[in-house]
């Protein structure tokens, strides 16, 4: 079969981006396999004149802006290809792009549309890229290599594809029809078309083996408020048309993060929306079996295209499953939308395996912002599509106390819970309000963390297991001598989720509990770690990078043994040096100690032993350890006053501990405790600035080292 792709590009000004896009298509797409169609929506920047000079482009010059859907429909009517490609003009295509997309599109008659991954997109279609300046050569080099070496990365089924680059079979277009022009000038027409394709029986695929560059949002960057208004308006139109609020049941997949997936695990989600969240879970864990329930007819129908899903109200419907069938039953913000939450829990409990878990999420009615609105009389129900405790569909309100009571009445045990706060709202005004609430006597100081928690995820089990608290994001009061907190500054959820998986597989000493604390949007490593110190009452802290994977399942036992053996040990690391070089770079020291698996040169992971021979003693006292994993039993503030970025915070903290009389040590390691999948690190100007600050502060210490 001879393929011909009709590439349809909408333009509205931004001629410079259009030229880059066309240049890349001409250079990296085989001649004779495509036609170029540009629909210009009333540009005033010279696009008209430029198009008239092009000999290989079909075009329409609209006198008014017909919107994205309207313009695309004009292009589709002109197209003669076997497939159409909706492509934004702020994209750059790279070698191998169209061949890879076509391979996926024609992999099965059931596939109706496919889309690539990119550097800038929602819908989990974006990946991390090594380039920062959006320069042509960097983009082409990375993209071409990505498309060449990732042929085994696989294709992933989706509920939605973004219209920045969407390849659709012409046969599917003829069956489904044109884009819906009610979504003017743009946004949600791609959501709508995705659902229409699925409704017609087609699969959508995300091609994880195909990359193109996307600058993103160039047409709306100058009109941020206008863009927000358009987005809100079209979201309402979408909701009215389909009878759903969202394709996703979970905004950030937090309900899935602690699932222990094994072959054959069975998961039921009640309130699954259109299955967009579940399909991401399935992509990550193909061996799991997924089932869904949703009230909305459309949502249940769309999800049922990919998973067994039934439409119904959990409070009144009969459940068709066998008893003790599910390993997990998930209710993402669902229980608060029921009339009788207790009856719902009692109803679903028999369908849970004896060692299974019910995972429910809900908003906290005790959050200080809600109390503030209630006291001021300014609260109101909202239908703004950003879910909160006052959304129209919220029928029941929960605090931690009411959740405990609910679990007890349902004869369920809270195994552990996550309590999410909003550190960015911790202003002086809000802190004063919280203090005033506690001064009234109605809210004791021990409840301060509840006032700062806006959302809970509760993990329930049938068995009466010892209660374990994990990921409690706000704490106050006395230190818990039997708690270990794992603290990470996070900017990559994919990396962090892998890190979390290794933490949740650790052996925990009897009577001890663990918590995980993810600090997002930190200004620096030191600032993030200081923020964490305020949010946990754990005595023991394990500070680790998001790309660390702990492989010693007994690491907590080993750490506690060290600290009990010598109370003067303040900090433990897995690699370190006896003497910090006078230039401040610890890793350039002549002699070191420790063991780790890493890839600092960007290549394959390998085991690296820093000392010449195994230590004869239980540990070696050092002057610096690597910050990829640092364990403490005492708290000292991190020097965020000095280090505003991501360098030298670790060596600084080691010296601060020693100045207070504590030992910094590396244990004798027969086997490595952790992997650090750091990859190649480029020392930027930020590194040099931090190094100069470090030397200015600590040079006297470096000169006095005797080891």
Image: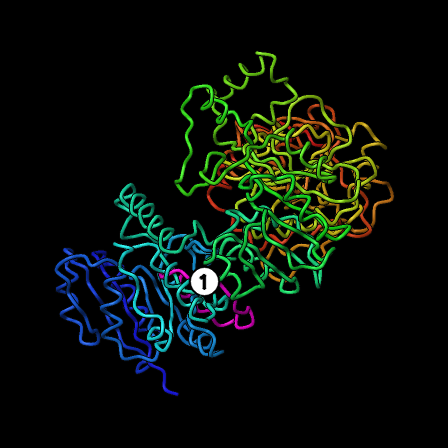
Residue 344 shows in the view:
yes
Q: Nearer the viewer, residue 399 or 576?
A: 399
Q: Is residue 80 left or right of residue 615?
A: left
Image quadrant occupied by the N terminus: bottom left
The residue wearing badge 1 is 117
Return the residue nearer the eye: 566 or 511.
Answer: 511
Q: Which residue extends farthest bottom?
A: 1
| Residue 403 on the magenta segment | no
Q: Position of residue 509 (x, y in %)?
A: 82, 40
Residue 109 versus residue 136 in the image, above or below: below
- Read off the magenta span: 138-163
Task: Give the quarter of the image for residue 378.
Answer: top left
Q: What residue is shown at x 20% (from left), y 59% (from top)?
A: 66
Which quadrant of the structure image shows residue 168?
bottom left
How many numbered circles does the render carry?
A: 1
Q: Secondary structure at mark 1?
A: strand
Q: In this view of the protein, can residue 543 be seen by the observer?
A: no
Dot 1, crowdedness within 10 Å: few (<14), some or many (≥20)?
Answer: many
Q: Position of residue 443 (x, y in %)?
A: 61, 18
Relative to 403, say whether 126 is above or below.
below
At x 48% / y 32%, what residue is drawn?
A: 424
On screen, residue 483 above or below 609 = above
Residue at the location (60% across, 23% down)?
448
Specify how the rendered protein is coloured. Answer: rainbow
Residue 51 vs 517, above or below: the answer is below
Tell me the quadrant of the picture where the C terminus can be found. Answer: top right
Relative side of 301 to 500, left or right: left
Q: Is residue 153 magenta?
A: yes
Q: Residue placed farthest to the top in the image?
A: 440
Q: Position of residue 706 (x, y in %)?
A: 73, 32
């Amino acid at each position: 079969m001879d393929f011909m792709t009709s590439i349809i590009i909408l333009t509205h000004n931004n001629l410079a981006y259009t030229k880059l896009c066309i240049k890349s298509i001409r250079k990296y797409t085989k001649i004779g396999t495509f036609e170029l169609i540009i629909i210009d929506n009333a540009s005033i920047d010279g696009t008209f004149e430029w198009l008239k000079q092009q000999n290989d482009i079909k075009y329409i010059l609209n006198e008014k802006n017909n919107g994205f859907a309207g313009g695309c429909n004009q292009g589709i009517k002109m197209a003669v290809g076997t497939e159409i490609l909706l492509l934004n003009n702020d994209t750059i295509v790279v070698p191998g792009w169209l061949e890879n997309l076509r391979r996926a599109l024609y992999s099965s008659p059931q596939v109706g549309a496919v889309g690539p991954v990119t550097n800038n997109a929602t819908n989990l279609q974006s990946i991390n890229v090594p380039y920062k300046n959006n320069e042509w050569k960097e983009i082409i080099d990375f993209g071409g290599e990505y498309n060449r070496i990732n042929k085994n990365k696989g294709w992933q089924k989706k509920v939605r594809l973004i219209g920045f680059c969407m390849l659709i079979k012409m046969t599917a277009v003829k069956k489904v029809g044109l884009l819906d022009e009610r979504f003017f000038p743009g946004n949600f027409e791609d959501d709508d078309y995705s659902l229409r394709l699925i409704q017609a029986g087609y699969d959508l695929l995300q091609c994880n083996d195909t990359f193109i560059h996307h600058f993103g949002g160039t047409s709306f960057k100058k009109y941020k408020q206008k863009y927000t208004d358009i987005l809100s308006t079209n979201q309402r139109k979408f909701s009215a048309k389909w009878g759903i609020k969202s394709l996703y049941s979970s905004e950030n997949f937090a309900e899935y993060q602690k699932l222990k997936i094994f072959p054959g695990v069975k998961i039921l989600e009640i309130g699954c929306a259109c299955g967009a969240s579940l399909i991401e879970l399935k992509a990550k864990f193909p061996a799991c079996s997924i089932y869904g329930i949703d009230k909305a007819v459309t949502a249940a129908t769309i999800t049922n295209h990919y998973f067994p899903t039934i439409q119904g109200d959990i409070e009144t419907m009969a459940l068709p499953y066998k008893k003790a069938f599910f390993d997990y039953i998930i209710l993402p913000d669902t229980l608060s939308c029921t009339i009788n939450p207790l009856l719902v829990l009692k109803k679903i409990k028999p369908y849970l395996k004896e060692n299974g878990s019910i995972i429910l999420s809900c908003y906290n009615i005790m959050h200080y912002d809600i109390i503030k609105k209630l006291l001021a009389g300014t609260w109101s129900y909202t239908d703004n599509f950003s879910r909160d405790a006052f959304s129209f569909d919220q029928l029941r309100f929960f605090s931690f106390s009411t959740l405990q009571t609910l679990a007890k009445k349902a004869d369920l045990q809270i195994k552990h819970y996550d309590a999410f706060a909003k550190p960015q709202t911790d202003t002086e005004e809000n802190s004063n309000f919280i203090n005033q609430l506690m001064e009234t006597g109605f809210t004791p100081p021990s409840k301060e963390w509840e006032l700062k928690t806006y959302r809970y995820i509760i993990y329930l089990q049938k068995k009466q297991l010892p209660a374990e608290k994990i990921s409690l994001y706000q704490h106050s009061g006395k230190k818990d001598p039997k708690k270990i907190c794992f603290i990470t500054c996070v900017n990559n959820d994919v990396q962090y989720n892998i890190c979390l998986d290794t933490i949740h597989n650790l052996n925990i000493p009897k009577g001890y509990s663990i918590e995980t604390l993810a600090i997002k949007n930190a200004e620096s490593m030191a600032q993030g770690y200081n923020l964490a110190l305020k949010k946990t009452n754990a005595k023991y802290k394990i500070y680790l990078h998001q790309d660390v994977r702990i492989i010693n399942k007994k690491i907590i036992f080993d750490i506690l043994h060290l600290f009990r053996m010598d109370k003067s040990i303040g900090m433990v690391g897995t690699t370190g040096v006896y003497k910090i070089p006078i230039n401040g770079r610890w890793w350039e020291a002549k002699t070191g100690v420790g063991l780790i698996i890493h890839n600092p040169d960007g290549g394959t992971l390998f085991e690296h032993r820093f000392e010449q021979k195994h230590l004869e003693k239980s540990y070696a006292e050092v002057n610096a350890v690597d910050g990829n994993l640092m364990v403490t039993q005492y708290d000292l503030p991190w020097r965020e006053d000095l280090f505003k970025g991501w360098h030298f915070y670790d060596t600084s903290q080691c010296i601060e501990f020693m100045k207070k009389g504590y030992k910094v040590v590396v244990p004798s390691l027969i086997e490595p405790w952790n992997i650090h999948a750091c990859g190649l690190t480029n020392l930027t100007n930020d590194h040099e600035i931090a190094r100069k600050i470090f030397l200015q502060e600590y040079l006297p210490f470096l000169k006095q080292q005797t080891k």
